[in-house]
Image (tube, grey):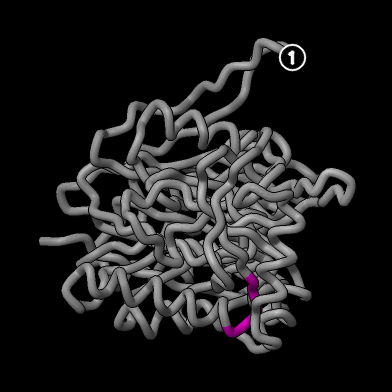
Amino acid sequence: MSIRIGAAVSTELDPLTAAREAAAEAGRALGGDADLALVFASGAHLVAPEATLAGVHDAIAPATLIGCGAGGVLGARREVESGTAVAVWAAVLDEGRAEAFHARIVGEEGQEMLEGLPDMAPDGAVILLSDPYSFPTDSVLTGLADAAPGIPVLGGLSSARTRDGSGALFIGDEVRSDGAVGLALDGVEMLPCVSQGAAPLGRELTITAAEGNVILELAGRPAIETIEQVIAELELPDRALVAAGLLLGIVVDSGQPEYEQGDFLVRGVLGADPATGAVALGAAVAVGQVVRLHARNARSAAEDLRRELQLRTDAIGGEPAAGALVFSCNGRGQQMFGACDHDATAVEAELGGAPAAGFFAAGEIGPVGGRSFLHTFTATVAVFPG
């Protein structure tokens, strides 16, 4: 017997009714109570989120539950980007195991410590849902990469808080106001999918001088000068894309002599100094790393998501997945694509109708080049083979 997954969304206004409805519908695919549930709640559900959690427990009695407040939710081929809704994703894990945790930063300033992270299985995976105001997700991901290399971390930053302004993180039947909640998965096969939605442009360049997150030289010349030259070499339509927002993709570590689109960590250009020719990025860089110009628009984002999902379908032999968890940037949706339900529809189509649910995050977590990062304007998907 393999993992079984169900997912559903309810837009009922009453938290208890909506949670029961969504959880019961998700539970129909399981043939019984759930080993695991993830709950994403928006709107009126954040007035008394404990009622939403109670409804889920009433309907499918999950042994383990986590979730968070969301500006919008998605699931069952639909997206509810605002207003009141709850998405429930439920699973029976067969012989797998999911351990819920609540991680926090504790201690005096200058002596802070991270507590609450469980031991990670060498071949495991992590789902992480963070409060953006009280949890240093970037730093924790760096620490996890050093302490548990190769373990994929997927998830997102909670994008809504309770009505009194507190954090909205769910674990079991409780609401926590700070830190992060998550799952340490063991014996559960999960394929991470990260779609940064940006297309590479122009030729590859090697960093020849850098400091921190500042590129001083590219290919032996001032960074600005080299970038301007590459832009001048582009066709006019590609120049227009770059003019709308310049991004640089940084090769993290593909282990290959040639680089594919998914090998680049895409980051925005934060600023430039014409006097020195230096360019600042939203990530640390090092001499010897390869970079390439990137640009993002609706078309590149749509094509990249479908391409990345298709690669995961190919990896599981073309069979439908058991299900998927979706963490989509709250800057995507109608704002990016001009139409409703884009990411939810793409996931449903490319994964053979697999049940999926998730939320619109204030930052998305997923691996590039074997290490997990915090992204923006990205869709990260945890694909579970059947």
Q: Residue furthest right?
A: 275
Q: Is residue 51 visible?
A: no
Query: Which residue is rendered at x = 69% and y = 47% of the image?
Result: 282
Camera-side residue of 149 and 168: 149
Relative to 163, 99 lies left or right: left
Q: Quadrant of the C terminus?
A: bottom left
Relative to 147, 16 lies left or right: right
Q: Is residue 181 visible?
A: yes
Magenta range is 295-299
Relative to 170, 23 lies left or right: left
- Report x, y in % for residue 238: 66, 81
The secondary element bearing badge 1 is classed as: loop
Query: Which residue is rendered at x = 63% and y = 18% of the image?
Result: 106
Q: Quadrant of the N terminus?
A: bottom left
- Report x, y in % for residue 102: 51, 33
Query: Which residue is rendered at x = 89% and y = 46% of the image?
Result: 275
